[in-house]
């Protein structure tokens, strides 16, 4: 009896691992084109810069810093007309899109060209909102290589004509290794999101062809917001 239970458990484990591997392969194959060379990126309406960690001090994590730097390269090269920064701003004291906006402004990107999505709580939400709230049709997704297949897969499932610019400008140490491992299950979740069309928080339209400053949102109450000084530090 015990032997049978062990065999069944082992069989279930093998089938589960096979399913995870198959779904990962599916996402990677469906993702589409990506590159690390700005010159090879086709022109698009907008760069979509996906959020990552911001420290309490206001310093961007290494991953976020590199994403923003690559978005600046895209804009300066004329590969995109607008930059949409999308991330977590679920509370006053933590603001990924605002931090990215400040960094872009400090790098010389014009204010009108910077759009902020304050409800990009995950990759699926960022892509759905890019298409349905901001009216983006063509985009260059900017993120790290481990994240890119899932990001491009979800962008296409959300209706975007998307290409990827990899933002691996430096090593990310332990955090990078942890993120890469987590990505294995995140890709499985992504397929579920795309298949079910999981609902996300939407809202009034903010056309990407307009003035990005209209999307910057209200200022936080005094003493409740994150540090507003742009800090380009590493994690």
Image (cartoon, rainbow, N blue to C red):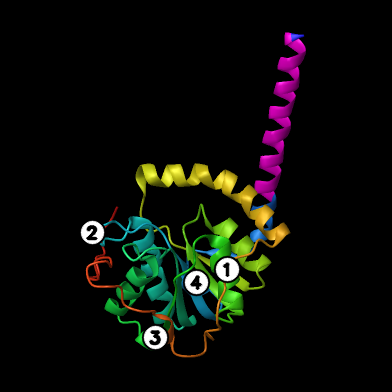
Q: How much space separates mark 2 and mark 4, taking CA atoms?
A: 25 Å
Residue occupying the far front of the picture:
221
Quarter occupied by residue 190: bottom right
Marks 2 and 1: CB-CB under 8 Å? no
Q: Which residue is mark 3?
A: 213
Secondary structure category for the residue under label 2: loop
Element under disc 3: helix
Residue 26 placement (x, y as % from top left) = 70, 51
Q: Which residue is mark 4?
A: 48
Q: Earlier in the sequence, mark 4 or mark 1?
A: 4
Question: Quick one: SS at disc 4?
Answer: strand
Rounded to the nearest angstrom, the CA distance separating label 2 from label 1 is 28 Å
Instruction: Tell me the element at label 1.
Output: helix
Tell me the CA gap for discs 2 and 3. Answer: 25 Å
Of residues 138 and 29, which is closer to you in this image?
A: 138
* 71 relative to 233, above or below: below
- Which numbered disc, 4 or 3, marks the residue that appears first in the sequence? 4
Disc 1/disc 3 C-alpha distance (Å): 20 Å
Residue at (53, 64) in percent of width and height? 35
Q: Which mark is residue 105?
A: none
Q: Position of residue 107 (x, y in %)?
A: 29, 77
Q: Position of residue 179 (x, y in %)?
A: 46, 47
Q: How many marks?
A: 4
Residue labelled with disc 2: 57
Residues tagged 4 and 1 counted as in contact (Cβ below 8 A): yes
Q: Earlier in the sequence, mark 2 or mark 3?
A: 2
Query: Mark 1 = which residue?
Result: 127
Quadrant including the N terminus: top right
């Amino acid at each position: 009896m015990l032997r049978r239970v062990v065999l069944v458990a082992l069989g279930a484990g093998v089938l589960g691992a096979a399913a995870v591997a198959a779904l990962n392969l599916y996402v990677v194959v469906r993702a589409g084109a990506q590159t690390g060379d700005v010159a090879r990126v086709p022109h698009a309406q907008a760069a979509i810069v996906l959020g990552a960690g911001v420290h309490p001090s206001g310093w961007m994590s290494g991953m976020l810093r590199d994403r923003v730097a690559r978005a600046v390269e895209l804009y300066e090269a004329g590969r995109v007309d607008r930059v949409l920064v999308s991330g977590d701003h679920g509370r006053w004291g933590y603001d990924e899109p605002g931090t990215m906006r400040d960094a872009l402004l400090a790098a010389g990107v014009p204010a009108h060209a910077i759009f902020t999505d304050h409800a990009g709580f995950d990759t699926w939400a960022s892509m759905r909102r890019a298409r349905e709230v901001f009216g983006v049709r063509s985009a260059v997704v900017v993120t790290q290589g481990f994240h890119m297949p899932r990001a491009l897969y979800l962008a296409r499932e959300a209706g975007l004509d998307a290409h990827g610019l990899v933002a691996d400008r430096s090593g990310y140490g332990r955090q990078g290794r942890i993120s890469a491992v987590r990505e294995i299950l995140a890709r499985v979740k992504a397929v579920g999101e795309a298949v079910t069309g999981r609902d996300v928080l939407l809202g009034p339209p903010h056309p990407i062809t307009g003035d990005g400053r209209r999307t910057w949102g209200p200022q936080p109450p005094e003493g409740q917001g994150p540090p507003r000084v742009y800090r380009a530090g590493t994690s």
